[in-house]
């Protein structure tokens, strides 16, 4: 996943800065979704000049480029996870409700739908919540 994420960073309009590379490494090591505050805590150990607003900006910029994905929970906090999907194919994410692992789900019939109940569909977002294989064992 690290290679895909680093490749996405290199192909994006964003510069491959040490902090952005470190953010990708943090998500790879954690293998879970994180809050901006958690990313900030880990980054501030490596970089003397590291501020929370900059972390928020980097996370959002990396989300716009498809390197990260926003994870939605019911507590209204911001969460991000690494997006391992390569390229720009349409996909969605599944999140383990126990450990926070993020996976990809390809294939979506909604992508082909143009109208629902008279509404013209212009975009959609779908996140599935479940229990990952590791947590099912425990």
Image: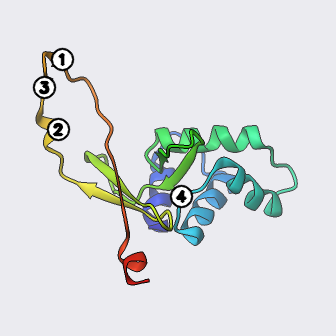
Q: CA distance from mark 2 to mark 3?
A: 8 Å
> Which label sits on residue 36?
none
Q: Mark 1 or 2 closer to N-term?
A: 2
Residue situated in front as seen by the camera: 16 or 23: 23
In terms of secondary structure, where does tag 4 sit? loop
Residue on which disc 2 sits = 110
- Element under label 2? helix
Mark-to-mark CA distance, 3 and 1: 8 Å
How far apart are the two marked residues, 1 and 4, measured between alpha carbons?
33 Å
Tell me the distance, in whole angstroms, between the alpha carbons under discs 1 and 2. 13 Å
What residue does disc 4 label? 33
Give the mark nearest the N terminus, 3 or 1. 3
SS under mark 3: loop
For label 3, the residue is: 114
Residue 55, quarter of picture: top right
Which residue does the numbered mark 1 point to in the structure image?
119
Q: In 3D space, how far apart are the residues under numbered discs 2 and 4 (Cα atoms)?
A: 25 Å
């Amino acid at each position: 996943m690290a290679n895909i994420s680093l490749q996405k960073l290199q192909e994006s309009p964003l510069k491959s800065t040490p902090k952005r590379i470190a953010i990708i490494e943090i998500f790879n090591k954690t293998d879970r979704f994180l809050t901006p505050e958690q990313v900030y805590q880990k980054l501030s150990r490596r970089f003397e000049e590291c501020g929370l607003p900059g972390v928020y900006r980097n996370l959002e910029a990396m989300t716009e480029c498809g390197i990260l994905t926003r994870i939605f929970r019911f507590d209204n906090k911001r969460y991000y996870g690494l997006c391992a999907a390569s390229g720009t194919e349409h996909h969605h994410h599944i999140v383990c409700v126990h450990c926070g692992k993020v996976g990809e789900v390809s294939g979506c019939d909604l992508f082909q739908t143009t109208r629902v109940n008279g509404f013209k569909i212009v975009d959609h977002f779908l996140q599935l919540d479940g229990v990952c294989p590791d947590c099912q064992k425990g």
